[in-house]
Amino acid sequence: MSARYEAAREAYAKVGVDTDRAIEILKKVPVSLHCWQGDDVLGFDQKGRGLSGGIQTTGNYPGRARTPEELFADIEEVLKLTPGTKKINVHASYAVFDEENPWVDRDQIEPRHFKKWVDFAKKHGIGLDFNPTFFSHPMAKGLTLSSPDEEIRSFWIEHGKACIRISNYFAEETGFPCTMNIWTGDGFKDIPADRMGPRMRYKDSIEQILSEPFDFAKVKPCVESKVFGIGVESYTVGSAEFTLSFAASHPNKCIPLMDNGHYHPTEVVSDKIPALLCFYPEFALHITRPVRWDSDHVVLFDDETKEMAKEIVRNDALGRVNMALDFFDASINRVSAWTVGFRNWQKALLNALVLPSESLKALQDQENFTKLMVAQEEMKLYDFGAVWEEYCRQENVVGDMSWFDELESYEREVLARRQ
Ligand SMILES: C[C@H](O)[C@H](O)[C@@H](O)C(=O)CO
Ligand SMILES: [Mn+2]
């Protein structure tokens, strides 16, 4: 333990904060690392097909992972450079096909196509989350689960059911619950003539997917909402009201997922978190950084990120919010992007854990807003960096930016050779 940490610990103790306890709590909180940052959301099952579904990566930084082996190696780098308990968030498009398990379409995928992910998770003693992939596929030209074309809709329902079975396999094999997120880019570019029809079909499709047997203690299906996507600017089938109502009306079957990039830029998810906590025993969160829109920039240690973490921590909801990162930047070193984003969410959680939340709440309840402002501002100058360094030290990762030396050598030795 450094002298700097000892001094910080003493200073925090004077305002009633136990920094050792904060560190111990954070060590056990799982955060899901999204597999898709490593290859620009391309996946392995549709070679040569670009990204669709109204999402977009921009940039052409060298070193994109092109094979499962390359992606696993890159994720291992991130695991090495980040503190905390991790899960890996896998998309169905990252099925691993080989001679033993030749290619099948998405409605036919089975647990065996994800065995390499399970092996990887077991090697690192971590859990897996899962996502059906309703985009970047010839059957995903327009609507998917909300399509009026029954052939298309049933293809995607079968895909969703297959994903429940794979999520169950993940949970059984790893021993950790698997969050399975349903997101589609279904929507319309211009003003629709029927807004309810697609939503009724979407509702029916998700219900059919959820009719596949699963144990809610092990598999946590969720529905992610969105306000708009590229090319579907006028109408999104899975809107916020739709997904919240769907989850509320399917208790113990489905939970909502909020992605903080999926709202109007003036809306803040930090305010929505406590609203959902009043009603949902559990929900899921995608953590990203929307720059003017759902741009999926790398998560920073910025004000709204800190505020989201505060709402989870001070409402004692670390066990009720399934947290996952969701960004993709192809304009910078992808392994660095992953690492920075993961470390920043860890920082936000730790920062929230070392705030004197109870006394700040008391000031609010006493309507002492003057002192509340002063106290909140004062906390910003406490030596949080010392607590972060101690946390990293205990987790055997570096606390300062010297992790970047390792990353630069990985770039030289590995990424730069991928031509
Ligand atoms: C790749 C993910 O499924 C995707 O990012 C989704 O979660 C989303 O946020 C779409 O905007
Ligand atoms: Mn998302």
Image: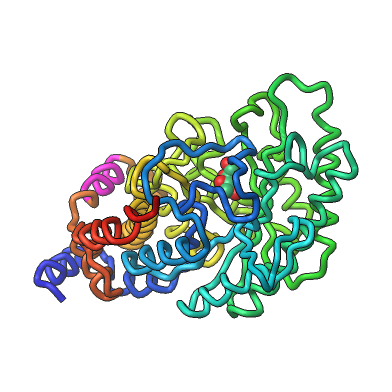
Quadrant where the image shows the N terminus = bottom left
* Range of magenta residues: 370-378
Q: Residue furthest left?
A: 3
Asked whether 214 or 141 is in front, the reply is: 141
Q: Where is residue 196 shown, x and y percent of the image? A: 83, 32
Residue 217 in view in this figure? no
Q: Is residue 373 magenta?
A: yes
Q: Residue at x 88, y 38 (%)?
A: 149
Q: Is residue 235 above or below residue 52?
A: above
Q: Position of residue 394 (x, y in %)?
A: 27, 76
Compared across the picture, whether 120 is left or right of 411 comes to: right
Farthest residue, direction right = 150
Quarter holding residue 251: bottom right
Determine if the magenta segment contains residue 341.
no
Q: Is residue 247 left or right of residue 125?
A: right
Residue at x-position 27% and y-position 74%: 396
* Residue 117 seen: yes
Q: Position of residue 203 (x, y in %)?
A: 82, 46
Q: Position of residue 339 (x, y in %)?
A: 35, 57
Give the vertical position of 368 relative to 249 (above or below).
above
Residue 195 placement: quadrant: top right
On the rendered structure, is 118 left or right of 205? Answer: left
Which one is nearer the viewer's eye here, 350 or 379? 350
Q: How would you classify the magenta stretch by its main secondary structure?
A: helix
In this view, the residue in front, 101 or 324, is 101
